[in-house]
Every structure is written in structure tokens, then in C-alpha cells.
Image (tube, rainbow, N blue to C red):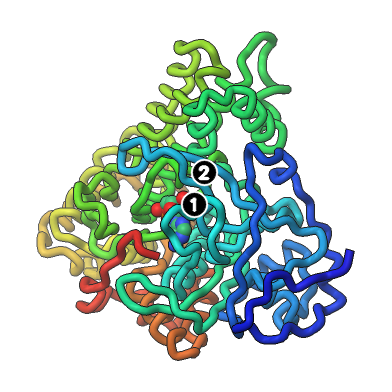
Amino acid sequence: MTETFAHAPSAAPTPTAPDAAFTDLPWVQRFAALGPDFVATLSPSPLPAPYWVGRNNALAFDMGLPEAWASSDALLQTFTGNHVPKGTAQTASVYSGHQFGVWAGQLGDGRACSLGELAGLQVQLKGAGPTPFSRRGDGRAVLRSSIREFLCSEAMHALGVPTTRALCVTGSDAPVWREERETAAVVTRVAQSFVRFGHFEHFSHGQQHAQLKTLADYVIAHFYPACRHGAQEGANPYAALLAQVTQRTAEVVAHWQSVGFCHGVMNTDNMSILGLTLDYGPFQFLDAYDPAHICNHSDTQGRYAFYKQPNVAYWNLYCLGQALLPLIDDQEQAIAALETFKTHYPQALAARFAAKLGFAQAHDTQKPLIEAALKLLAQDRVDFTIFWRRLSHWAAAMDPADTSVRDLFMDRAGADALLTLFRALHEQSDGGSPASVLARMLRTNPKYVLRNHLGELAIRAAKDKDFSVLQALQTVLAQPFDEHPSHEAWAGFAPDWAAGIEISCSS
Ligand code: AMP
Ligand code: MG
């Protein structure tokens, strides 16, 4: 098969011949092979004169892309949707879902074009034009939201939070209309699988039980083989799947809560069957700690406020359980699988906060300390990331004369009481030497997170075709526990103008 530049529009530049090194990548089509009940074939709509906005060399290396990928025009065109390399497919998958608590019916990949799998990772072009599931949307993504997704997925990965990854962003000056005129971009995102709770809801709601089973068997075979092979004789593999997804979801949400990550649109169509953070839209890392914080300006009811995320995850798992019921065929088993959330989530959260506090293991005695810390942080609206990082350094000597933590609070007496409690618990525990406590805390409490205003700095520069801020942020966020003294300002408090950044679903 020869390489073709499909669907080149008159506005697009004449494509150059694809670089030989990239024509034989070992693409695999496992999901697309499920067939037309699951995916629709499409043609990506090219964008004129694409340029690189951001690239992730470490991920490219892991995926087996040649080192010179950055200089490959073929790859620039491929990751913009302008060029269709040998071995790729162009598909969008169908799913449904509950949005803001209400059944929304059929949704599907409205702007994501899947190319297939490389090195075990599905590759999707987000923003490559309309698909059969675009409904009223334009199939595009804007530069602003693409940069946010690119930076945040890699920042989350570096924090150790399960997430979809981002390989690159390409841009084009083609206009895209949102609240105002913006320009187009394409994020190439990758994950072992992009299957969502909503995929199961789709086939269940439509009474397509054969397809529901095909999908569940696909997910079990590729990602949860123990649900079939490790299960006891007679045990239901679909109930085992539900239990596994419940556990992974509990873990990822506990991780979010521990780093102050607000997802913003936890609709069931944005919930990964692998427990990955998926669909970066109006997300935000908390600056000041406010458990009731709503990061999505479209979420007028506050359904997805920060503190509600665990409950919403549980609600979403119930939707998944309902969808799997025709396969589990036993309500008791489904409920038993879902109920495990009530133990997994608190355990996962306790483990995260134990580490944040410098303890080797979670223990019930830490609960009053965690509660006191969160209560005081909320009361004084203290910066979440800065508090934990300063506490980490304070723990090295636990010296009351070191006022770095107490200075963060209006309530100085409250802060002193908190630090006293912290020190007392460490004295009672066998958490190790101050040096080991410090080391544990410094690798758990990041110095750098992708605060909204940092993303905004990268976006503003990128709009002027200056990608240096994005690159520097990318480098810092890839090692968020390191000091990076030359970027100290990015570890500081959010400036006043950060409060004016409005993030909505519009992306
Ligand atoms: P989201 O709120 O981003 O999770 O998207 C919800 C649904 O809308 C999904 O089916 C998306 O594929 C679709 N969608 C979002 N933005 C667009 C767009 N610009 N064009 C087409 N479909 C879109
Ligand atoms: Mg979505």
C-alpha cells in the first residue's frame, strides 16, 4: 500500500513526501477490529500549514518513534490529521453517558480520531475534524485547551497519577469559533485504552447485549485477564471486572484529592474503564484550599465541586454496574462489587495522606491530624500545594522557631496546635529518621503543579508563536518534586489575576 495524503483541502500546503523512517511503524488495530457496531470510519479534515506546538520526547521514545521525529514533516502532518500513514485506521467510537447526572443518550468521539495502537498504546488525534458523532460540534480543539491537556496529562503522569498521556500538540492558524475567535490545534493523546463507562452504558441502554459482552470480553482479555483466569470456579468475570474498576476508580480519585486536582466534568462518558484521568477540559489544581471549589464555570449547581468527586465517582460506578447487570445477571453480586468502594476509597486516601504527612504507613491515629490540617487549610484558604511542601521542609527539624508553615495561616494558634500534633505523632511513630521523613514528604508533596495561571502563561506566549514557556513548564512539571531553583516563581502563590481566569466546558 502506498502512502497517501488523503483529503488535502485547497487551503492546505502541498505535502512533502513522507520521510521513509516513519512509513513502517508497527500499527496494530485491536479496538477497531471490534467492527462497525463499535467504531465508525472517518476521514480527518486537514488543517492548513500545521506547526509543532509541543512534543513529548520521552513518550515518543517509549512508543518507538525514531529520535528524529521532530524533524519529520510526515509526522507533523500525521499528528495533524493531514496524512494517513500505512497501517493506521481512522475511526471514532460510539458511546453514551450521563452528563451532569442526566442520561444524555448517544455521544461518541465527536472530535477524536483513533489511528490504532503503537507499542500497546492507542493513539488518538483530538481535534482532527468532525466525526459521525460530532452532533452540532465542529470536531475541532482550540490551541488553549490543547496546551492545557498536553501539559496537564504529563504533569499528572509525573505526579504518579494514572492518566491518559499526551505525545504532542500541533497547531494551525485556521480559525475556530468559541466565545471568540481562536485557532485550531490537535492533541495526540495516548492510552492503553480509551474505553469509558459510557461505552458500556451505550450498549446496555440499547439492549445490545451481544455487543455489551463483546466489549466486556475485550476489556477483560486485554486489561483485566485475572477477572477471567484468576477467578474462582463459577465466579462471574463481569462482577470481577466491576470490582476491579471500582478499585482503580477509588485509587485515582483518592490521588486527585491528595494533590488538589479538580476534574471538572466527571460525566460517565469521561470515566476511564482503566481508572485513568481522562478528558482534560475545565480541570484545575487548587490554589487556595477550598473543598467546595467549582473549577468549571458551566457547572452552575456545583455537581463536580472538589469535595464531591469521590461521591460522584461512586455514583458513576453505579451507572457502570447498572450497565453491566445484563452480564452479571445477579444484582447482589453487582452491589457487592460496588460496595467495595466504601473500603477502597478511604484506604487509598488514608495511604496518600499518610505519605503526605511523612508516615511509612497509614494508621488510625493520623485521622485527627489529617482532619485538623484540612479544616485549618479550608478555614484560612491556605494554598494547598505550598502548605504541603513547606510542611515537608519543616519536618526536617520540626523546629517551632521555624515559622515558614505558621506564616501561611491567619490562625497562628491553630497552626501551632497543628504542628504540635504533627510532631507528637511523629515522635510516637516509627516513621524513621527526620531525613527519611523529609525524603518521603518531598517525593510525595510536589513543589510544582499546573496551576491555571501557569498554563495561561504558556498559552499566551504560544498564541504569539513563542513556545518557550510551554517547553520550560513541561520540563519543570516532568520533575515536579525537584527544586528547579531557576523557576522558583512557578512554585509561588497564584497572582491576583489568576482568579479572573474562567474555565468552561468550551474547549
Ligand atoms: P466533553 O464534555 O468534552 O467530554 O464532550 C462531550 C461530548 O461532546 C463528547 O461526545 C465529545 O466528543 C463531544 N464534543 C466536545 N467538543 C466537541 C467539538 N468541538 N466537536 C464535536 N464534538 C465535540
Ligand atoms: Mg468527554
Q: Quadrant of residue 167?
A: bottom right
Query: Can you tell me whether the CB of the residue at mark 1 lies under 8 Å from the nearest atom of ligand 2?
Result: yes
The structure residue drawn at horizontal position 64% and vertical position 23%, both measured from the top left corner, is 210
Q: Name the amino acid type tagged 1.
A: Leu
Residue 446 at x, y = what percent? 43, 63
What number of labels is visible? 2
Q: Position of residue 425 (x, y in %)?
A: 31, 44
> Within 10 angstroms of label 1, few (less than 14), some, or many (20 or more) residues?
many
- Left or right relative to 23: residue 435: left
* Viewer-side residue, 10 vs 48: 10
- Determine whether 239 is above or below 117 in the image: above
Circle number at residue 433: none
456 and 34: which one is in front? 34
Residue 504: where, in percent of width, then height?
30, 62
Type of the residue with mark 2: Ser
Residue 124, located in which quarter of the rendered image? bottom right
* Tag 2 residue: 272
Per the image, label 1 sits on a secondary structure element best described as loop
- Residue drawn at 44 percent across, 37 percent down: 250
- Image quadrant containing the N terminus: bottom right
Whether residue 439 appears in this view of the structure is: no
> Does the CB distance between marks 1 and 2 fall below 8 Å?
yes
